[in-house]
Image (spheres, rainbow, N blue to C red):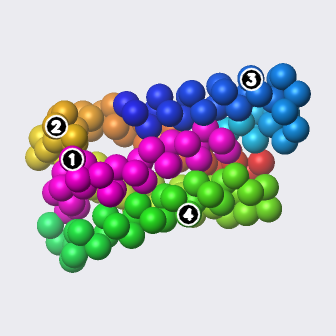
Amino acid sequence: MAPLISLLLGFGAARLAGLLGVAGLDGWHPALRVGLALMFVVTGVAHFVPSFRGDLIAMVPPPLPRPDLLVTATGILEFAGAAGLLVPTTARWAAAGLALLMVAMFPANIHAARRKLTLGGEPATPLGLRSVEQVLFIALAVAVVAG
């Protein structure tokens, strides 16, 4: 739920700033980029915080090698994508890369839901709800690409 909340708060704050005259935030597209960037910073941080990192490593499906390295790499990619979203000239490429990353990471969410794993001590989001969230996040990233 934290990713969705951070996305909505980031979007809302950026949209409000745009309405108050902050240059560069004068439409839904820049506000969406800010919301998505905040979401990916929040999710990226989880890859390195000890109380979440072990759970994220456990979410990696068993056939994949080096779950610890995969969690580190995806966290770095989320940070890089978030930064890219904030730069107008790279935003579309960053959004496309993040959309692909979300597709690639979705099997880990399926694995976590089916195995009833925890994330930060809380049960993983049920698969139905997580699927809806993932489709929404990917659609918003594609909306940035479409611009």
Earlier in the chain: of badge 1 and badge 4, it is 1
Rendered position, 82 above or below 9:
below
Name the residue that disc number 2 marks.
121
Instruction: Let me know if residue 131 appears in the view.
Output: yes
Mark 3 vs mark 2: which is more N-terminal?
A: 3
> Mark 3 or mark 4: which comes first in sequence?
3
Give the spatial CA distance, label 3 vs label 4: 25 Å
Nearer mark to the viewer, of 1 and 4: 1
Label 4: how many residues lie within 10 Å, few (<14), some (14-19) or many (20+)?
Answer: some
Residue 107: which quarter of the image? Answer: bottom left
The residue indicated by pointer 4 is: 80
Look at label 1 and name its amino acid: Ser
Q: Tags 2 and 1 in contact by the CB under 8 Å rule?
A: yes
Q: Which residue is mark 1?
A: 51
Q: Are marks 3 and 2 in contact (CB under 8 Å)?
A: no
Q: CA distance from mark 1 to mark 3?
A: 33 Å
Q: For the residues carrying marks 1 and 3, which lies nearer the camera in this image?
A: 1
Q: Secondary structure at mark 3?
A: helix
- Residue under label 3: 16
Specify the segment rendered in magenta: 33-61
Which x, y percent locates residue 82? 58, 54
Would residue 41 be counted in the magenta stretch? yes
Q: Position of residue 71 (x, y in %)?
A: 31, 64
Q: Earlier in the sequence, mark 2 or mark 4?
A: 4
Query: In this view, which residue lies farthest toward the left?
Result: 115
Q: Is residue 108 left or right of residue 28?
A: left
State whether the magenta stretch is mostly helix, strand or loop. Answer: helix
